[in-house]
Amino acid sequence: MPSHDAMRAPDPVPTDRRPSRRSVLRGTAAAGAAGLAAAAAGAAASPALAAPGRPQAPDQRTGPSPATLPAGPIVVHVRDARSGDIEVFSGTSQTSLRDKDLAARIARAIG
Amino acid sequence: MSSHREAPEISKDPVADSTDVYAFVSPDAPDTVTLIANYVPLQLPSGGPNFYEFGDDVLYEIHIDNNGDGQADISYQFRFRTTVRNPGTFLYNTGPITSLDSPNWNRVQTYDVAVVSGGSSGTLGTGLPCPPCNIGPLSTPDYASLAAAAVNSLSGMTVFAGQRAEAFYVDLGAIFDLGDLRPFEHLHAPVGSLSARHGVNATNHLNVHSIAIQVPISSVTIGGHPTIGVWTSASRRRVTLWDADRGQNVLSGPWRQVSRLGNPLVNEVLIPMDKKDLWNSLPPSHDKQFAGYVTQPGLSALLNTLYPGVFPKLAELVDARKPRADLEAILLTGIPSGIIDGFTTFTGPVLADMLRLNTSIQPAATPSILGLLGNDPAGFPNGRRVRDDVVTIELRALAGLTYQLIDSHYKPDAAAGEISDFVPDPPAIGSPPTSTFPYLGIPYSGYNHPS
């Protein structure tokens, strides 16, 4: 019998709005840029978060549709800024990714 | 204690700290089993104005393994929700609480129950009321009625969640003072006083928070397997972030287990300090890695040191480094058939710390608090009843009394059959267990305790 871990979550996010891994990753980018930028009074005012010399991905230019964003907060945990080891939490979901560039930009944002 | 504050991390998180698990065939409804999981240890009844409650941010579960693989086949899940009716006062209640919907009760807790089984999850009840804490004669003048009103009958089960009186008894102060047992203090090497003393029940007049369910035996067993394994767990979301602006925590991520309890005292006194938090995070099916701490218990060796000359046979057993197959059977596999006439709690070879209950054994007409050691097969380690003296039973087992079950040539020390933290009798419990569900006594009131 498999573990009940997967069955444990009375998820505050309705099933039909539970983020897929892809959407979480998109959300992560939004959180890295938008979430932290909000704390820093906007991405445009936060040069530490900007990626100079790199063209912005289409999602970052236009922003994700509100319908695809998770309803609750997205929490990003940079486990190791040097390796780019990042965990992203939303609802009862967790996604791990490795993105040195994103980790470096987040690290720069906190000074 | 059974599992109160047993590991470094969970000792700092009492809301999620499981303290005791009980599992027994209900004496007044023998076609059912009663499963009780206690949390929030060592409650001083007068501890207001923010009295004790379950954690809204904790997932509480009672698990049942009915095929012996150490994994949950049925999990009952409990989630709590706190409502403040009048945020403008600091008071828990603004007048007498005479019913569960009393407008005088300011901080109310309700809960949802779900069951996970066979890969699917179903809701059994929502918005079920907890009783308030027992405040005192002015605030909770008829507490028994409030508690009775909080016993809920759902489809196929009876459930209760709320404050009850602590029923576990132990001389904490002495035992954790270098393994002192007051009745045997005169034999204790570091103490060596001339006279034995009476034990002190350190948990008397304290409360806990209990989750109790009563379910038909037929709903938790499978054919040919009358013995179930029971444990409780508490889980928290992986992320807790304090949002000071909102004055509340932001919770995110999947649930992760932070507390576990099956057999009493296993994590508390058998698992070493650097493994306790890990043990709490794992399911019983992962317990093989801890088996050495059960079969070579440090406490058995310590008994020889603390009580020199009292346990010579045990000393030989420890020195020989013979694995304690008796303890492995009692705690990790269940006792196979053929060892004790007509008795078994064996669930298979998987080493898993679970409270094993053979549901085919009927409740005893005259229970012995020493359970199987008292020739009462309906008691611990066949499940655990509220009054079972699990400290004495396990102390005696650790002292070698049960080794003769697997080695008929072994003659245990006389002291192994006498060792206890209470001699000659266990202590009286101020609010004794009841004869009906949820079986734990009415919680002590803050007005009267301490007195």
Image: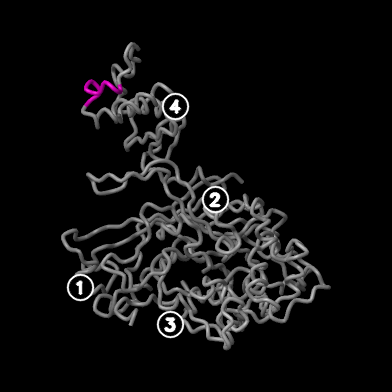
Q: Is residue B423 magenta?
A: no
* Residue at horizontal 22 percent and vertical 44 percent from the top: B245
Q: Is residue B61 above or below residue B389?
A: above
Magenta stretch, main secondary structure, is helix
Q: Secondary structure at mark 3?
A: loop
Q: Identify residue for label 2.
A: B278
Q: CA distance from mark 2 to mark 3?
A: 36 Å
Q: CA distance from mark 4 to mark 2?
A: 28 Å
Residue contact at pointers 2 and 3, CB within 8 angstroms: no
How dense is the environment of label 2, judged by Cα within 10 Å: few (below 14), some, or many (20 and up)?
A: some
Dot label at residue B430: 3
Q: Identify residue for label 1.
A: B95
Are dots 3 and 1 on a single chain?
yes
Front position among marks 3 and 1: 3
Q: CA distance from mark 4 to mark 1?
A: 59 Å
Front position among marks 2 and 3: 2
Q: Secondary structure at mark 1?
A: loop
**Magenta stretch bounds:** A42-49
Q: Quadrant of residue A35?
A: top left
Residue contact at pointers 4 and 1, CB within 8 angstroms: no
Front position among marks 4 and 1: 4
How many discs mark residues in the rendered view? Answer: 4
Front position among marks 4 and 2: 4
How dense is the environment of label 1, judged by Cα within 10 Å: few (below 14), some, or many (20 and up)?
A: some
